Amino acid sequence: MKMMKVRMVYKMVNWEVVIWTCITIAVLLGIGALILLFISAKNIKKRTAELKEVHVELKPGMKIMFCGGIYGKIVSVREDQVEVDVAKNTVITISRYSIQNIL
């Protein structure tokens, strides 16, 4: 059996192409990150404004849901605290900033 000679041809890597490809990918990722940052900041600002409005409108007798998913009725409102009736003869004191929704 006759052995065939296999000749390997090594090509030089064109580093200029590799570098420009890396730069292009980095720029595209950076643009994507800026877009996500802008959208997130806009949504956070909107949600913060909604919550600020909720916290200002608190009055006794309102039905609320706070962050833990617990529902209750406001008994009294102090500066930073709210007393909430969550069950018959059960009143708890919570931070007004833990209120998530007014029902």
Image (spheres, rainbow, N blue to C red):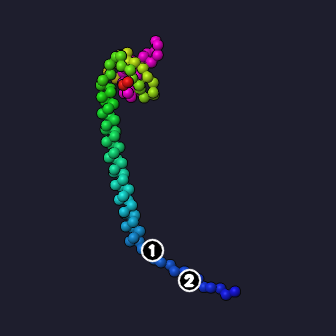
Kindly indicate the quadrant of the structure image that contains residue 25.
bottom left
Which residue occupies the extreme front position in the image?
Answer: 103
Q: Which residue is mark 1?
A: 13
Which label number is shown at residue 7? 2
Give SS at disc 1.
loop
Please say whether residue 81 is visible from this viewpoint: yes
Residue 26 in the image: x percent, y percent? 38, 59
Q: Quadrant of the N terminus?
A: bottom right
Local crowd at mark 2 within 10 Å, few (<14), some, or many (≥20)? few
Residue type at tag 1: Val
Mark in the foreground, 2 or 1? 2
Please say whether residue 87 is one of the residues in the magenta stretch.
yes
Residue 35 in the image: x percent, y percent? 34, 50
Magenta residue span: 81-101
Residue type at tag 2: Arg
- Residue nearer the viewer, 83 or 3: 3
- Looking at the magenta stretch, what is its main secondary structure? strand
Real-space Cα distance between discs 2 and 1? 19 Å
Which label number is shown at residue 88? none
**Residue drawn at (34%, 35%), measured in percent from left and top?**
47
Please say whether residue 20 is one of the residues in the magenta stretch.
no
Please say whether residue 95 is visible from this viewpoint: no
**Residue drawn at (46%, 16%), measured in percent from left and top?**
87
